[in-house]
Image: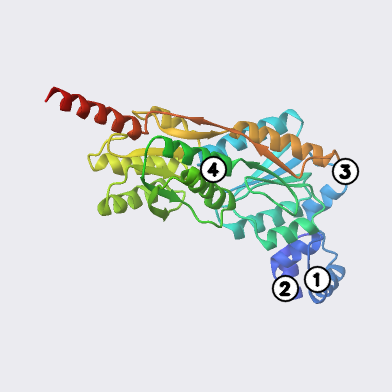
Amino acid sequence: MGKLTMADIARQAGVGKSTVSRYFNNGYVSDEARTKISKVVQKTGFEPSVAAQNLRLKETHTIGIIAPTMTSVVTGRQLTAMDETLREAGYSCIIITTNHHPEREIAAIEYLRSLRLDGVILIATTIGKELEALQKSSEVPFLVVGQEFESGTSIVYDDYRAGKEVGQYARRMGHEDIVYLGVTEKDEAVGRLRKQGVFDGLKQDGETVKIADMRETSFSYEDARVLTEQILDEHVPTLIICATDKIALGACKAIQERGLRVPEDVSLIGFGGYEAGSLLTPSLTSVHFQNHEAGVLAARTLISMIHGVPVGRMQLVGYTFDKGGSVLDRRAQAEDRADSDGEKTQED
């Protein structure tokens, strides 16, 4: 009997494996399915081995972390800070990546909860109803990083204010022909709030700014490079604002391959503060989010939740705006040109 698996129980009960997982993790299961599973469990005496071991312990000193990717600079900084902080407090980590697939996030959460870990941190890409339902049925402390989670506890970046500062800066620098390269609005933080902040910053004080285009891409460097090539086929904007530094690096590559110069021909702004941006010539103008601080805060917040210490429902992480050399001051350039023309007129 001990060799039985959840898949065996699911097959005998005529339900899905995920339903069996939720059953053992006290998640939502219909009355009909619960009755079927219960009968099979009673008949076989089945008990998940890992869960059975962990149930005998008050704490496992293990934390589950779910991340969208391992290749992102931002996520890498967060994970490193979380792992270091948790280890210092005596916890080990199990990390699962989802490749930006929301359905994999749900499956990962259900799996980690079945292990009876002390807590779970989700670096989220989206927040859906299924995630909210899991939160409400969970007895395991659960923390979301990167997206506001109304049904639970979250740590978020100040995406709107950062975006607005970028928009205001672009306006002050005299840019009137701008392309914004964003990501899907299913990503509330990066896809919607960051973009909305940029647009509101551009439109402030009633000044007219021409948004030449708003294009949606993925988080991929290569997709951003290809999309920028398509944009340059249509026209050359004075400024491209990118939702992430990786997108900005892809755009920069496409600009340079056309023989165009940054910032003289096309200015460029990103979000993320990647080290790679500082290696460009000129260095990339970018919003630097405090990713390490966010990771430390996430770890400490989850530890507080585990021990029943009250925490804020939503905690905001700050940023700095690093003004590199990738944005041309077109307003100053126009003033210099006007002064030069005036001097020539006087000479004539």
Q: Say which label, 3 or 2, has the lower sequence index.
A: 2
Compute the Cα span from label 3 to label 2.
Answer: 31 Å
Q: Which residue is identified by label 1? A: 37
Q: Residue furthest left?
A: 348
| Mark sitting on residue 15 | 2
Q: Which amino acid does the dot numbered 1 rest on?
A: Ile
x then y, percent, for residue 126: 61, 55
Tell me what residue is drawn at x 53 percent, y 56 percent: 185
How busy is the neighbourhood of tag 3: few (under 14 within 10 Å), some, or many (20 plus)? few
x then y, percent, for residue 183: 48, 52
Compute the Cα span from label 4 to label 1.
Answer: 36 Å
Q: Which amino acid does the dot numbered 3 rest on?
A: Lys
Q: Which residue is identified by label 3? A: 58
What is the secondary structure assignment of the residue under circle 4? loop
Compute the Cα span from label 3 to label 4.
Answer: 31 Å
Tell whether label 2 touches label 1 (CB within 8 Å).
yes
Q: Which amino acid does the dot numbered 2 rest on?
A: Val
Q: Which amino acid does the dot numbered 4 rest on?
A: Met
